[in-house]
Image (cartoon, rainbow, N blue to C red):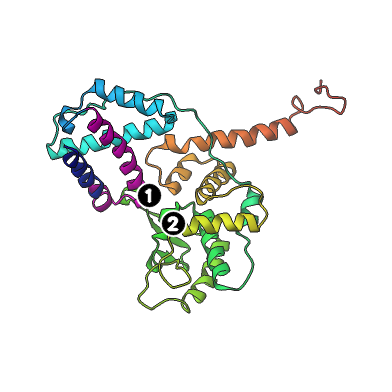
Amino acid sequence: MEQQLRRQVDQFLDYLRDQRRFSEHTVSGYRYDLAQLSDFCQSHGISSWQVLDPSQVRAFVAMVHRRGAAGRSIQRCLSAARTFYRYLLREGAVSGNPFAGVPAPRAKKTLPKTLTAEQASHLVAISGDDALAVRDRALLELLYSSGLRVGEVVALDLAHLDLKAGIVRVSGKGAKTRVLPVGRQARQALSRWLVVRSQLVRPDEMALFTSRDGSRLGTRAVQLRVRRWARHQGLGVPVHPHMLRHSFASHLLESSGDLRAVQELLGHADISTTQIYTHLDFQHVARVYDKAHPRARRQTHGKRSP
């Protein structure tokens, strides 16, 4: 029973990785969520995905909630299960989707953390001529300049970058390709790195960013290097690669006000995903208002202007 359930999950994960071209990080998230569902089915004597019904799905949601999962985590779990069942329906393994219409607890909305423009500029201003410093400056400049996901930047090959044209070709979620501009500072940093890179790697290595031994740089290595440089540069806040993507989007929207352009650059399929940055932008506008508007300014004696 258990082997049958897990075999179909493994086939689904292979489908996500090989055909949908999902990142390993995303596939790992699906694996974790569906493992919880498989364990639930096994403990409740559910022998196949076909016999799982909506009442049992609600019991599963209640169980995950009792274990302390937040609303957003439960939403993600239900989304993974719905996607899995859509796959099973296409394969003819089930006749319905018991997760359709089953609600998740409302998730608390939190705004993504961003760096100020000054903090971002300070973070990427890495000095030094050793190979790792040159590489890391190019890496961080590109993350902030073009708003890349960490999985996108480690997947880049030399052929994806055109410094003369100032563009980089990125394969994003669902194998969707987008062409992004590369800023002047990032182009300069990348030019320096390409000179150093050629001295480190074999001629047949295609990866744009490589480790000290010449192999492709991994996601975990990028996360550790970003965290290290945030400490070294004295930012005083924990920084991860996705924070640079959030900062890119927030600063671009703050300057341009063009939500559609930011959506295209980030590669969001739905503009509602991008709209969270309008809330960040409003916070900036509110601060400007409080500081500058005659009706908002406070006089030295603590009363508002008349």
Residue 227, visible in the rendered structure: yes
Residue 101, visible in the rendered structure: no
- Closer to the chain start, of discs 2 and 1, is 1
Question: Range of the magenta residues?
Answer: 15-44
Quarter occupied by the C terminus: top right
Q: Residues within 10 Å of mark 1 (few under 14, many from 20)?
A: few
Q: 167 above or below 11?
A: below
x and y percentages locating residue 35 in the rendered image: 29, 39
Magenta stretch, main secondary structure class: helix
Q: Which residue is mark 1?
A: 25
Q: Which residue is mark 2?
A: 219
Q: 256 above or below 107?
A: below
Quarter occupied by the N terminus: top left
Q: Residue at x 49, y 73 (%)?
A: 194
- Secondary structure at badge 2 equals helix
Residue 294 forms part of the magenta stretch = no
Q: Residue at x 32, y 34 (%)?
A: 79
Residue 162 got which mark? none
- Secondary structure at badge 1 equals helix
For the residue pair 30 and 86, the one nearer the viewer reads as 30
Looking at numbered disc 1 in the image, what kind of residue is underneath it? Answer: His
On screen, residue 174 versus residue 264, left or right, reads: left
Q: CA distance from mark 2 to mark 1?
A: 9 Å
On screen, residue 32 versus residue 166, left or right, reads: left
Q: Residues within 10 Å of mark 2 (few under 14, many from 20)?
A: some
Looking at numbered disc 2 in the image, what kind of residue is underneath it? Answer: Thr
